Image (cartoon, rainbow, N blue to C red):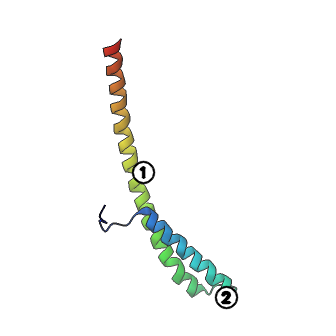
Amino acid sequence: MAWNGKRTICEVLRESMDLCGDFSQKIAESGQANIYEAADLVQPLMCRLEEATVMAKKMDGKLREYKAQYDEGWWAEKIEQTEIGG
């Protein structure tokens, strides 16, 4: 399957975890984080988390849409089978 240029939620979450690790390492190395260093590290993390949240909301909407369509068809099929068989 060819890459379509869109980012996935998994990719964004992996990047977020990497940024958290970088931030934790900086704090461990320095003993305490400089407020400006912390802001520089937190800003990219916040951007990734916002992006992941938007993706998750879209995914939730699509999954709910698919489930609604799936259930409707399933019930209609079962009713039809019951009427035919019974």
**Residue 84 left/right relative to 32:** left
- Where residue 10 appears, as percent x and y from the top left, is 46, 63
Classify mark 1: residues with Cα within 10 Å, few (<14), some (14-19) or many (20+): few
Element class at badge 1: helix
Give above or below for 79 relative to 45: above
- Residue occupied by mark 2: 30
Task: Tell me the residue at 66%/86% (across/down).
Answer: 29
Query: Which quadrant, please, contains the C terminus?
Result: top left
Pointer 1: what residue? 60
- Number of labelled discs? 2
> Which residue is painted at 37% across and 27% down in the image?
75
Q: Position of residue 73 (x, y in %)?
A: 33, 32
Image quarter in which the N terminus is found: bottom left
Q: Quadrant of residue 39?
A: bottom right
Q: Image point 33% across, 26% down: which residue?
A: 77
The picture places residue 12, in percent across and down from the top left corner, at 45, 68
Q: Residue at x 36, y 44 (%)?
A: 65
Q: Is residue 13 above or below residue 86?
A: below
| Label 2 – label 1 distance at C-alpha | 40 Å
82 relative to 62, above or below: above
Q: Residue at the right extreme?
A: 31
Residue extending farthest top: 86
